[in-house]
Image (cartoon, rainbow, N blue to C red):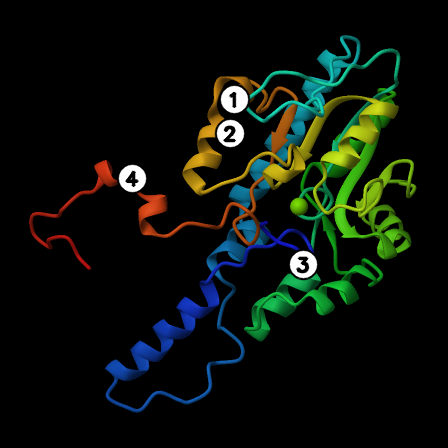
Amino acid sequence: MFGMVGRGRARPALRVAAAAMLAALAGCAGRSPPAPVPASPASPPPGMQYLYGSAEAAALDVQAFGMLTAFVERQAERRASVVLAADASPDGTAFTACGDRPPAVVFDMDETLVLNLGYEMLEGRSGKGFDADRWSRWEQADGAALAPLPGAVEAVAALRRRGVTPIVNTNRAAASAAAAEVALARVGLGAFRHGETLFLAGDVDGQRGKDGRRQEIARRFCVIAMVGDQLGDFSDGFRGDPAARRALATAPAIARLWGQGWFVLPNPVYGSGLAGDWDAVFPADKRWTDPVEGQGK
Ligand SMILES: [Mg+2]
């Protein structure tokens, strides 16, 4: 449903809005606006400024990875799975069994372990939208224009020292498995092996949804934590409009997992969190009218 290509993208309208604003400003100046949309915005869209450039996002990342490390220190002996059972819905509480399987933590890759700086700057400056073919070429690149998320390298190393296996479950294409292994190692995250500790789109069940791969990983490991920037990194069950997804994510059965087995990272640039019109985002009973300016438009 959301995002059938690349990283599960639902594109924001940021560049469209910026172009419209520029055109309006040009109109205010009393001149005819230039026909072509500016090819290279003067600065990155706000979401990119935040995710790739801000201290605030870096602090959130370090915070999440630090909480993960502390959680694993507490949980490695207790060994409780945080993968929802195959027949469980996101508002349920049933988890896969651990048995005597070795402990593991499952990570998404993009904007969870690595920041796609090279790709995103190219896309942001070009003014073009997401393109699946361009993204495929990026997946095959050498990883020199990637950076690890702040805190990720230290957290993954701490897991390994603790005897906990880090595993990547990504929607990069299976054809990019070798390049993904190289890229993860290059940014300092160590060795991942396709089919063992690295699972890609279509692996296991041929699906883009990650539940099938999660179930397979849980058959091999005791998954004590999961980390991602999209709710699909935790369960494929977070469907519906923004209000429905928020209700699911904050229902008691799921709310107790955030920071306690499920660790979520910010992504204001792309993905399932970027959806909803005015009515979907702002509840009808929470409107305000400025006594001076009125309702606005
Ligand atoms: Mg991601």
According to the picture, the residue beneath numbered tag 3 turns out to be 117
The answer to whether marks 2 and 1 mark residues whose Cβ atoms lie closer than 8 Å is yes
Occupied quadrant, residue 222: top right
First in residue order: circle 2 vs circle 3: 3
Occupied quadrant, residue 238: top right
**Amino acid at the residue labelled 1:** Ala
Using a 10 Å C-alpha cutoff, classify the residue at mark 4 as few (fewer than 14 neighbours), some (14 to 19) or many (20 or more).
Answer: few
Q: Mark 1 to mark 3: distance in Å?
A: 31 Å
Rendered view: 234 above or below 43 = above
Asked if residue 175 lies left or right of residue 108, the reply is: right
Q: Position of residue 220 (x, y in %)?
A: 88, 25
Q: Mark 4 to mark 2: distance in Å?
A: 17 Å
Can the viewer see residue 252 in this picture? yes
Foreground residue among 249 and 49: 249
According to the picture, the residue beneath numbered tag 1 turns out to be 255
According to the picture, the residue beneath numbered tag 4 turns out to be 283
Front label number (2 vs 3): 2
Q: Position of residue 170 (x, y in %)?
A: 75, 45
Using a 10 Å C-alpha cutoff, classify the residue at mark 1 as few (fewer than 14 neighbours), some (14 to 19) or many (20 or more).
Answer: some
Considering every residue shown, the one lying at the far left of the view is 291
Q: Position of residue 47 (x, y in %)?
A: 50, 54
The residue lying at 69 percent from left, 21 percent from top is 82
Foreground residue among 162 and 91: 91
Secondary element at tag 2? helix
First in residue order: circle 4 vs circle 2: 2
Q: Position of residue 106 (x, y in %)?
A: 76, 32
Q: Mark 3 to mark 4: distance in Å?
A: 35 Å
According to the picture, the residue beneath numbered tag 2 turns out to be 249
Secondary element at tag 4? loop
